[in-house]
Image (cartoon, rainbow, N blue to C red):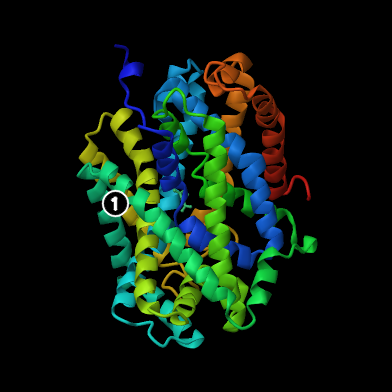
Amino acid sequence: MSEKKKRETFSSGFAVFFATLGSAVGLGNIWKVPYLTGAKGGGAFLLIYVLCVALVGIPIMVCEFYIGRKSRKNAVGAFEELKAAKGWKSIGFIGVVSAFLIMFFYSCVAGWVYSYVFKAIKGDFVGVTSATSSAKFASTLVGPMPPLIWQFIVLIVVSIILIAGVKNGIERITKTLMPVLFILILICDITALTLPGASQGLKFLFHVDFSQINGSVILTALGLSFFKLSLGMGIMITYGSYFTQNNNMIATSVRVALSDSLVSILAGIAIFPAVFSFGMKPSEGAGLLFKTIPLVFSKMPFGNILLVAFFLLTAIAATTAMISNVQVPVAYFTEEKGMGKKTAVLLTTGIMMSIGILATLSADSSSVLGNIHILGQKGFFESFDYLSSNILLPVGGLLTAIFIGYFVKREDFKLELSNQGTLNNASIINVLYVFIKFITPILLIIVFLNSIGIIKL
Ligand code: PHE
């Protein structure tokens, strides 16, 4: 049997969908989309974000799935297998660098979430008010040791799961837990909508004020769409490499993008009514989720138990997203550098911990390193986020689209996406192809030229 045939595949379309969603759904939905929407102008930002998901995210996801299934290799080996010139491997390399940058700050925020599980169990949020909730968040950030210890715990958990080889088991558990998280978010939505002044929150989230749109809003929304769907770093190439031959990859991409965006929007509906009802500002920044959600739960029966469950499930969703992320450098070290798995995992998480310290100690202006700026006005935390989401992931995505649009035969692309002609989707593929070849790369280039000041949007 050839190596291609021997490679395992997901057992069903359902398994494909959940595994992919396990990487996509994470802190992005519950923490980052709401906080950026709050900071960048509400409905106008959300609209641009949704457009980026549809016009850029979905086409890039299809490209990555194509490369993965066609080559049956991960991002590092895929381009070689497709007989692409050596330079294309740099997409895999961009993925490795992005994975590190993302984890430097992601593990910090995941640490806050883990710590909130314990704070909620201890009953710290019983009878919480907007002032005490903000104070609790501020005390979570006060370092240097507690937030660093939580970040460390997060990275140890991720390492143990990868080294013990129980990733598949974890994926099975997430499959059953994700719908529970979804239901908890819905319960929050219902409670939030009954708060006095809730309609102001909804207005903020859904009313589009076009005057809020500018180049920085577009770049942030674009970067967020890559971060959210785990695109531009080869993760979806790896998932695609496990797809069955009869998986409808376009439908899978659309389903993943829709479900993921739905979770983010529902999280927004839980948070923004509370922001206005409790007299907070939508532009609270990275603490928005942590300051508002305990208040929402305090208004429901069994609120504290449900709050524990909410943070526990968020911690699990964050952990599965991190596992998919950490595997990118681990695959690079084991497959390209011939390292053993355990060494590769420890090296990867060790680097993430060492440099991640800088993110944790600069998360807030009151933090120890809070006043050191590296990229313009940005501290370490924000710079890691900016460099990965707004620069490297979109560059990875742009190269992927150019690869498919200009270096893969159109016929090959059509055959693979129609499952050798068995799917009746020729016209959808044609539209998608126009996006991949022209629209998506042009949009990406315009946003870049604008962000480096060459053109002005
Ligand atoms: N998509 C994840 C989230 O929204 C974050 C992530 C980005 C995970 C890139 C893996 C790779 O939380």
Residue located at (64% from left, 40% from top): 56
Residue 182 visible? The answer is yes
Question: Which residue is identified by label 1?
Answer: 158
Q: Which of 416 and 164 is in front in this view?
A: 416
The residue positioned 53% from the left and 20% from the top of the image is 416
| Residue 246, horizontal then vertical, whole percent | 46, 24
Please indicate whether residue 264 sits to the left or right of residue 45 in the image.
left
Residue at the limit of the structure toward the top, as seen here = 1
Image vertical order of residue 381 relative to residue 234, above or below: below
Q: Is residue 439 left or right of residue 310?
A: right
Q: Nearer the viewer, residue 61 or 378?
A: 61
Give 349 or 8, whichever is nearer the viewer.
8
Residue located 49% across and 56% down the image: 28
**Crowding near the residue tagged with mark 1, few <14, some 14–19, many ≥20 C-alpha atoms within 10 Å:** many
Q: Position of 456 compared to 420: left or right?
A: right
Q: Is residue 396 visible to us here?
A: no
The amino acid sitting under disc 1 is Val
Q: Which of 246 and 105 is in front in this view?
A: 246
Quadrant assignment, res 105: bottom left
Please name the residue shown 35% across and 71% down the image.
308
Q: In this view, does 398 lie to the left or right of 427?
A: left
Instruction: Give the x, y percent position of residue 48.
Output: 69, 53
Is 195 situated above or below 20?
below
| Relative to 255, residue 216 above or below | below
Instruction: Tally the marks.
Output: 1
- How far from the left and from the top, in percent, is residue 329? 36, 39
- Label 1 sits on a secondary structure element that is helix
Q: Indicate the quadrant where residue 337 lies.
A: top left
**Mark 1 CB in 8 Å range of ligand 1?**
no
In the image, residue 29 sits, relative to residue 35, either above or below, namely above
Which quadrant would the N terminus be assigned to in this image?
Answer: top left
